Image (cartoon, rainbow, N blue to C red):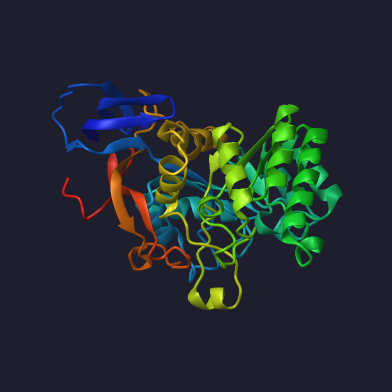
Amino acid sequence: MELLIKSANVVDWCGSYFGDVYINDGIISEVGKNLNKDCKTIDAKGLTLMPSFVDLHVHFRDPGFTYKEDIESGSKAAVRGGFTMVNLMANTNPVCSSMDVVNYVKEKASKVGLVDVHQVLSITRNFDGKEISHLEDIDNSIKIISEDGKDVMDGNAMLEAMKLSKQKDLIVMCHCEEHSLSKYDMRIAENIMTLRNLEFAKITGCKIHIAHVSTIEAMRYIIRYKNEGVKVTCEVAPHHLFLNDSVKYRVNPPIRKEEDVLFLIEAIKKGYVDVIATDHAPHTEEDKENGAPGISGIETAFSLCYTKLVKENGLSLSKLSEIMSKNPSEILDVKKGTIEIGYDGDLVLVDLNKKYEINVDEFKSKGKNTPLNGQHVYGKVVKTIKGGKEVYSSSKYNI
């Protein structure tokens, strides 16, 4: 399959230029100006071409909770948001504690054929908080383990899991929350557990990734341990950047104060935040009414981040590409996230000048749960391309 994209404003982590990109057999084969090929061609004049986005923190709810989302609906939502790879959490039913569940997810995603997936395995068996023997049985396709929204309360179990992860070269992805403190103060709960997990990583030498950092204190701890040489990466979610606690909407960790938002933005500018990840957590209306935390965010992520970070706070578009495409690709060890010969032909065309209104009725996700319905943002995803094939195209653009 061949595809030529012409006359685009090409932007990735290392810079920008106006030109053409040619994809052959799924791989970027030529970049430059005035390229001509006898193949399908997209005239991208007036649009920006970027590497497609990679989401390190996603819930597709399959198996077990497909009334909230399934792999097909989640994949359609992902490509509508400009994503062609997702890292799926283990809080399914059954819990993803075995290669059987991993293989089910991978096979189903392959049949849908819209996005590449990496399936996370649980740190403890079935989230029991203790048993880690199942980690001995995984194959080398597993790169990340996580207890997702539960964290591991038993310090010894977490230490042993980190030691094993060091041996197997796994990344331990941490949802930092000390459950015994959650009802007292969710801020303290996040901060205390962030510090514990960082110290454990320092002791064991394993690689850790801190999910959805939301407080000044937690980010300061991460900066300190990064500067000490601990192998830590971290992510911030779009809703923790775009919203502050004047918006009453339940996510976990909670939406924070404006001073937290500003500190996170400065940490992004200074290079301490490695990744933007959505924590896409689709729920039914009934689930939300019953108090389920989470936001359906994969379809709005780029627009929120472009509006908040680039237009309002002066971040370069190249830096946004770095933390939405290049860095998560490197963490997952895939050849995506860069517009360069030899890399996967996974790209996204966006209209940076397009201001539009978020409308949940247009979501491809089953989850319509967001406080952002009706919000005006900039940066419309026009086309998503995976391996040189269009997997999403906005009907509002005739190209």
Is any atom of residue 223 visible in this view? yes
**Image quadrant containing the N terminus:** top left
**Image quadrant containing the C terminus:** top left
**Residue 73 in the image: x percent, y percent?**
40, 61
Left or right of residue 175: residue 48: left
Is any atom of residue 273 visible in this view? no
Occupied quadrant, residue 44: top left
Occupied quadrant, residue 91: bottom right
**Residue 225 in the image: x percent, y percent?**
74, 33
Q: Is residue 239 shown above or below 13?
A: below
Q: Could you say which is closer to the camera, residue 311 or residue 296?
A: 311
**Residue 9 in the image: x percent, y percent?**
28, 31
**Residue 320 in the image: x percent, y percent?**
46, 37
Residue depicted at x 41% and y 35%: 317
Q: Residue furthest right?
A: 156
Residue depicted at x 44% and y 35%: 321
Q: Residue furthest left?
A: 38
Left or right of residue 335: residue 218: right
Residue depicted at x 58% and y 31%: 270
